[in-house]
């Protein structure tokens, strides 16, 4: 027992230090056929997690930023001062690394969808959000660095007069108003989030961060769900989990005013019971600021300023200043000696009335502003009511969002916009699926939608968002729904076909993982079509589908190292496709499938059977099909990528045959096609992954030819592509393996 | 101020076990005291790390010129064990009072946060998982304690455990994976 455990530790520790690509070989050797041991080792290795238990680990770099020092640490994580030093320019920034335990993927997804919106915020009193990424699995945000004091400390240190304090807050109000005009709420305005720089100008920090960190995705649908980040600075509606509006930010500004004018917050910070704090916020009328202030200030606060501050702090959002600009207006009128809008009286009465109205209830109507804003410049503003109706949802999910998705999908650079659309559609679909119990038509419609969602999320073979696990989940939902539909109509041909096609999608997203179930799904597809063929002739599209199922079987068999079975399935696939093409030579789908199938056959000959001559023969077939495809679809930007794939294989064959010069030429040609595609859409994950592998191979090829500086250059290009990868997709198995290949090659 | 250097020497060099017994409460009390009322040099307490507390206890409890790095490592090993207990007790106190967000935070809160942040779970869960690891492989559990709660390097841990650095490194890597799985 002991020696086995020691052996296990030794193997695990050794394997953990190896690049992913090299682990399998090492384990083959180290476990020497002891499958039980190997299984235990592999299970443990799955829990490899950078940063875990490394208490003192402070990053020395984050992306292009060099960390200079830690400047703070709070509920959300640590903040560092850093410097961008990529030669071009030196920019000092503040980087907030979000602590572990928050949902990294969700935060980053929100970050990438919000980034464009936040980038619109340009105001001298707002620190800009510049960048974001991940470090050791934790998200970080890069912001403009401000050298300054927190606003309260600044007022105290400079002994600021009442007027000076009001001027500071006026600048903050302007910043908040600017954001409101851009449809952005701050949601966490508080003294600690405002620094005053050496020019005496206040800077509001963390705009938009609160929303990014909101654990409850519901916020994006309804604007609710925000959990207060700082209990004492929460507004009544925030405490109740209701809708946040511009008036919520006005409330926060009121609290800030109160604190700077009276010198203390309206509700006692020493409260030990969170429920008591929450109750005070929702029910207790704050004392008039003048009653708490220093005598010199109290005299001036009494009257108008008291009224202004208390109006901003009304329990009922409708009783407050609707916007930051209105609050600022009253403050300016006060400074100029003009009558202000805020009037004393009725506060207690109104608060009571408001609580009576709202106890236990949610706000009646909500204003939801969602922005589908992204690189395509497409923006959609949509007003939603709390009592949204099922039919609206159905229409939205079933057609509207897909129309948008499909319309922008072929556009270069559309990935970010599509991601947002997909996310929205999924939210709608999930809410509908819960209500679809007996409705067969609806189930079919939903299943169809889930397939399209899955395609958008990451069908391996198309421009995609690189999220195969999520795609798989969508396909599973689709097949489950289609099975229910088929169970209700066992003889219905359409239901059989629907299920068969969905199973192909499912297995395509599965064969890198659960090979046995991918294999079973493909066999089921073939059986379903055989069943259909008994009652009606198969169409061209059916033929292509059956060929795809054989293609999938070929993939699974190859991954299980069943080489003859894999070749057999692929040759069957080619045979069927040639039959389809003979009947309809104009089918670009058949040409595309043929090019891929021939290329994969070549792959087996080259890499598994070490037979470059046969590989070359099939690659030439593949290239022919690829060229026909490009001719058939001249406007499709993805078609040249098929040829790039074949050229990359051809390059490997030429290398195996000893023709390094031709290998280099072909590889460079593949790289240039792919690089162009990536320039057009930097978030195209599949192309990026391929390019990383290409540069690994090019670097290796060049180094073997003693062209070290060119080799170094190629590896660097690979590494910078890897570094720029969207962190949300960097954990995809294909991405991980391409990066591991690059690392191993560059050693 | 008690000087634990002599106790360390008695324990380490003369094999006097009672010296360790005398030392433990001294270290424990000092850590708790430091953690509550941070008396160190001027510094924003929010950047405090758990191992800084251990360092400070070390500075206060020993006449450092008498200590070589090996003795220092052994002191830290004792302090790591104490630190783990101090933090565990603090977490229990804290949760019984339910006051974390509303009262001034003490250095120990920050130290605790750092550990819990690095472990991704609360300290009670981490402690329980470390106990299970100790039942399986006490040496590995000790390594984790030294590294996480004492801030010892691989080399210092190797000195304390009288093992090669390579062995400690291996235990550390395997222990992290095992604990991560256990806590998943």
Image (cartoon, coloured by chain):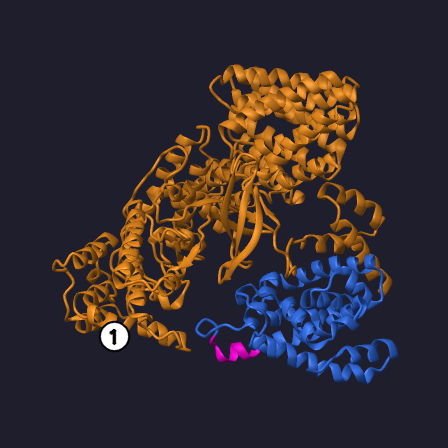
Q: Report which quarter residue A397 is drawn in.
A: top left
Is A327 above or below relative to A382?
A: below
Look at mark 1 in the image and give the residue it sits on.
A295
Q: In this view of the protein, which residue sits in the foreground, A501 or A453?
A: A453
**Residue at position x 28%, y 46% in the image:** A181
**Circle 1 sits in a helix, a strand or a loop, which is it?**
helix
Question: Where is residue A263 drawn, in percent x and y?
Answer: 32, 70
Which colour represents chain A?
orange
Is A585 above or below relative to A544?
A: above
Give the magenta part as a residue range.
B92-99
Judged left or right of residue B166, residue A692 is: left
**Residue at position x 69%, y 68% in the image:** B150
Question: Where is residue A172 drawn, in percent x and y?
Answer: 31, 54
The answer, for residue A728, to whether it is visible in the render is: no
Which colour represents chain B?
blue
Question: Where is residue A457 drawn, in percent x and y?
Answer: 50, 40
Question: Where is residue A255 drawn, in percent x and y?
Answer: 30, 65
**Residue at position x 63%, y 34% in the image:** A552
Quarter of the picture containing the N terminus of chain A is bottom right
Q: Report which quarter residue A508 is drawn in.
A: top right
**Residue at position x 61%, y 74% in the image:** B87
Quarter of the picture containing the C terminus of chain A is top right
Q: Please name the predominant secondary structure of the magenta segment in the image.
A: helix
Judged left or right of residue A343, residue A621 is: right
Q: In this view of the protein, which residue sits in the foreground, A366 or A152?
A: A152
Judged left or right of residue A326, residue A222 is: right
């Amino acid at each position: 027992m002991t020696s086995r455990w020691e052996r296990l530790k030794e193997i695990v520790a050794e394997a953990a230090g190896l690049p992913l690509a090299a682990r399998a070989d090492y384990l083959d050797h180290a476990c020497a056929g002891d499958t039980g041991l190997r299984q235990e080792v592999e299970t443990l290795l799955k829990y490899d997690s950078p940063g875990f238990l490394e208490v003192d680990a402070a990053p020395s770099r984050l992306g292009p930023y060099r960390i200079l020092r830690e400047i703070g640490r709070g509920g959300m994580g640590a903040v560092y001062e850093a410097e961008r030093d990529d030669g071009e320019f030196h920019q000092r920034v503040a980087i907030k690394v979000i602590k572990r335990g928050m949902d990294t993927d969700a935060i980053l997804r929100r970050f990438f969808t919000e980034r464009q919106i936040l980038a619109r915020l340009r105001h001298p009193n707002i620190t800009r959000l510049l960048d974001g990424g991940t470090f050791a699995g934790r998200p970080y945000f890069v912001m403009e660095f401000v050298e300054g004091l927190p606003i309260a400390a600044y007022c105290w240190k400079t002994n600021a007069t009442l007027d000076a304090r009001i001027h500071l807050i006026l600048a903050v109000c302007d910043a908040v108003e600017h954001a409101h005009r851009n449809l952005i709420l701050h949601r966490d305005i508080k003294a600690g989030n405002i620094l005053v720089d050496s020019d005496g100008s206040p800077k509001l920090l963390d705009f938009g961060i609160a929303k990014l960190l909101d654990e409850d995705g519901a916020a994006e649908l309804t604007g609710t769900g925000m959990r207060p980040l700082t209990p004492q600075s929460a507004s009544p509606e925030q405490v109740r989990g209701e809708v946040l509006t511009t008036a919520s930010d006005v409330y926060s500004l009121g609290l800030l005013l109160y604190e700077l004018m009276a010198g203390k917050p309206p509700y006692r910070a020493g409260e030990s019971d969170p429920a008591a704090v929450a109750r005070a916020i929702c029910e207790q009328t704050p004392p008039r600021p003048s009653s708490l202030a220093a005598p010199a200030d109290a005299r001036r606060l009494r009257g108008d300023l008291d009224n202004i501050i208390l109006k901003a702090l009304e329990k009922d959002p409708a009783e407050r200043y609707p916007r930051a600009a209105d609050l600022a207006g009253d403050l300016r009128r006060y400074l100029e000696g003009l009558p202000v809008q805020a009037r004393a009286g009725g506060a207690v009465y109104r608060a009571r009335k408001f609580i009576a109205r709202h106890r236990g209830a949610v706000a009646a109507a909500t204003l939801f502003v969602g922005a589908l804003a992204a690189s395509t410049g497409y923006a959609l503003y949509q007003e939603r009511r709390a009592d949204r109706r099922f039919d609206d949802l159905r229409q939205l999910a079933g057609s509207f969002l897909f129309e948008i998705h499909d319309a922008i999908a072929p556009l270069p650079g559309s990935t970010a916009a599509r991601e947002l659309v997909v996310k929205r559609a999924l939210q709608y679909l999930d809410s509908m699926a819960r209500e679809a119990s007996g409705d067969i038509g609806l189930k079919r419609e939903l299943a169809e939608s889930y397939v399209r969602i899955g395609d958008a999320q990451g069908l391996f073979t198309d421009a995609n968002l690189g999220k195969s696990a999520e795609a798989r989940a969508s396909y599973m939902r689709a097949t489950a729904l289609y099975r229910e539909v088929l169970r209700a109509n066992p003889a219905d041909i359409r239901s059989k076909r629907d299920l068969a096609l969905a199973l192909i999608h499912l297995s395509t997203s599965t064969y890198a993982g659960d090979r046995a179930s991918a294999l079973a799904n493909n066999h089921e597809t073939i059986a379903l079509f055989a069943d259909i063929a008994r009652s009606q002739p198969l169409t061209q599209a059916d033929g292509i589908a059956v060929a795809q199922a054989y293609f999938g079987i070929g993939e699974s068999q190859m991954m299980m190292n069943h080489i003859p079975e894999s070749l057999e399935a692929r040759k069957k696939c080619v045979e069927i496709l040639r039959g389809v093409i003979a009947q309809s030579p104009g089918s670009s789908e058949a040409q595309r499938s043929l090019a891929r199938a021939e290329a994969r056959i070549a792959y087996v000959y080259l890499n598994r059977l070490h037979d470059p001559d046969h590989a070359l023969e099939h690659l030439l077939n593949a290239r022919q099909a690829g060229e026909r495809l490009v001719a058939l679809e001249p406007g499709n930007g993805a078609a040249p990528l098929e040829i790039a794939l074949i050229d990359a294989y051809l390059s490997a064959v030429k290398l195996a045959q000893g023709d390094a010069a031709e290998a280099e030429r072909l590889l460079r040609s593949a790289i240039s096609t792919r690089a162009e595609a990536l320039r057009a859409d930097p978030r195209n994950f599949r192309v990026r992954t391929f390019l990383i592998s290409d540069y690994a191979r090019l670097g290796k090829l060049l180094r073997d030819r003693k062209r070290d500086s060119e080799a170094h250059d190629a590896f660097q290009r690979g590494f910078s592509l890897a570094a720029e990868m969207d962190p949300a997709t960097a954990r995809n198995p294909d991405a991980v393996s391409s990066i591991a290949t690059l690392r191993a090659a560059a050693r | 101020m008690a000087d634990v250097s002599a106790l360390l020497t008695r324990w380490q060099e003369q094999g006097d076990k009672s010296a360790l017994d005398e030392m433990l409460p001294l270290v424990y009390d000092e850590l708790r005291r430091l953690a509550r009322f941070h008396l160190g040099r001027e510094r924003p307490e929010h950047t405090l790390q758990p191992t800084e507390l251990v360092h400070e206890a070390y500075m206060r409890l020993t006449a450092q010129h008498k200590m070589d790095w090996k003795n220092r490592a052994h002191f830290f090993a004792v302090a790591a064990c104490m630190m783990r207990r101090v933090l565990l007790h603090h977490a229990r106190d804290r949760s019984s009072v339910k006051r974390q967000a509303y009262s001034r935070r003490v250095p120990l809160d920050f130290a605790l946060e750092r550990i819990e942040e690095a472990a991704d779970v609360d300290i009670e869960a981490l402690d329980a998982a470390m106990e299970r690891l100790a039942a399986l492989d006490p040496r590995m559990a000790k390594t984790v304690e030294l590294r996480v709660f004492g801030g010892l390097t691989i080399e210092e841990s190797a000195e304390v455990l009288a093992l090669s650095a390579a062995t400690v490194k291996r235990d550390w890597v395997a222990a992290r994976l095992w604990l991560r799985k256990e806590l998943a």
